[in-house]
Image: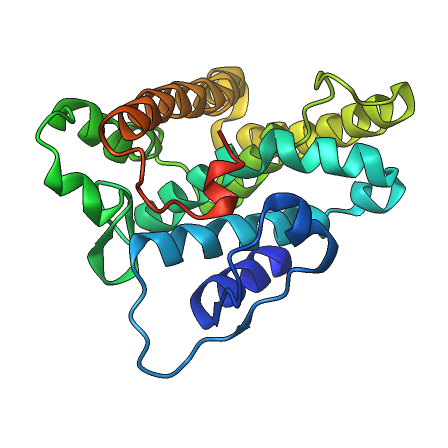
Amino acid sequence: MEMDIKRNNTFFNYQMCEDLSLDQLMISGVPKIKDQGVRFTSHDWVSMEIYSTIEFMKNLDLVHILTSNDLMIFVKNAHFKCAIFFIAVRSYISKMEFMTFPDNVDVFPEEISNVPDYSPKLLNRIRTLLISKFREFDVSKEELLLIVTIIICDPSVAGLSEFSMNIISQYQRIYSSALQAICQNKCGASWPTRFTNLLFLSNILTKTIKDLDDVVVLFKYHQPALPLRKLVKDSF
């Protein structure tokens, strides 16, 4: 929970000083205190979402055991999908039925309103699918944080050393056991159903990311000059 408090503090109270790539950010990227009165666009918010998610990942205990090369692979694999998950979590906790940034800033760039070819159905599915499942399963914040750490700890990522794969797999089992214990405490003998439903949220996240990939293809076709931040470009 402390890591999540720190992540939210960074997200709400800081801003990026430069338009950095993921590689640059991993080496030296540091945000500054948010300027008083500044109004963020979706581009600003998504940059802070990605940054604060990476910082969350880098504060996991297992990170200190990984080599610098494996750490980069570990972060690149999970940072963006988990940033999307955190957007959904924040919106869900705020009793919203769709993903949004603070002050009701849309999660999609303002520029897409200039092009009529984006499917409203597709955009709305991205905004709502995860949250609808959170609501259906009545997921607690504690469960959501364990789910996201399970998603982050994916030992099957190509390029990881065997040593790091084993470490990541051990931590995934630890987080899975903690989630299982919560389900047992909440549901008694029927805990396996809840546990399976909660793990299924990973599939919903994958579906949302696939839909986002389709939107990015439209971005590149209809608006090739759309000024996406380097962090966002590096995430697809």
Report which quarter residue 210 is drawn in. Answer: top left
Q: How is the image coloured?
A: rainbow
| Relative height, residue 119 to residue 30 (above, below) | above
| Relative height, residue 5 to residue 151 (above, below) | below
Q: Position of residue 137 (x, y in %)?
A: 35, 29
Seen as rendered, the residue at the extreme bottom is: 36
Q: Position of residue 81 (x, y in %)?
A: 49, 33
Q: Residue at x 61, y 48 (%)?
A: 54
Would residue 147 be found to the left or right of residue 156 on screen? left
Seen as rendered, the residue at the extreme left is: 116
Q: Residue at x 36, y 24 (%)?
A: 208
Would residue 80 be found to the left or right of residue 174 on screen? left
Would residue 191 be found to the left or right of residue 153 on screen? left
Report which quarter residue 131 is drawn in. Answer: top left
Which of these two is toward me, 134 or 56? Answer: 56
Seen as rendered, the residue at the extreme front is: 225
Q: Residue at x 79, y 47 (%)?
A: 61
Q: Quadrant of the N terminus?
A: bottom right
Q: How many marks?
A: 0
Report which quarter residue 159 is drawn in. Answer: top right
Q: Residue at x 47, y 16 (%)?
A: 193
Which of these two is toward me, 16 or 166? Answer: 16
Q: Position of residue 83 (x, y in %)?
A: 48, 42
Q: Position of residue 179 (x, y in %)?
A: 60, 32
| Relative height, residue 87 to residue 217 (above, below) | below
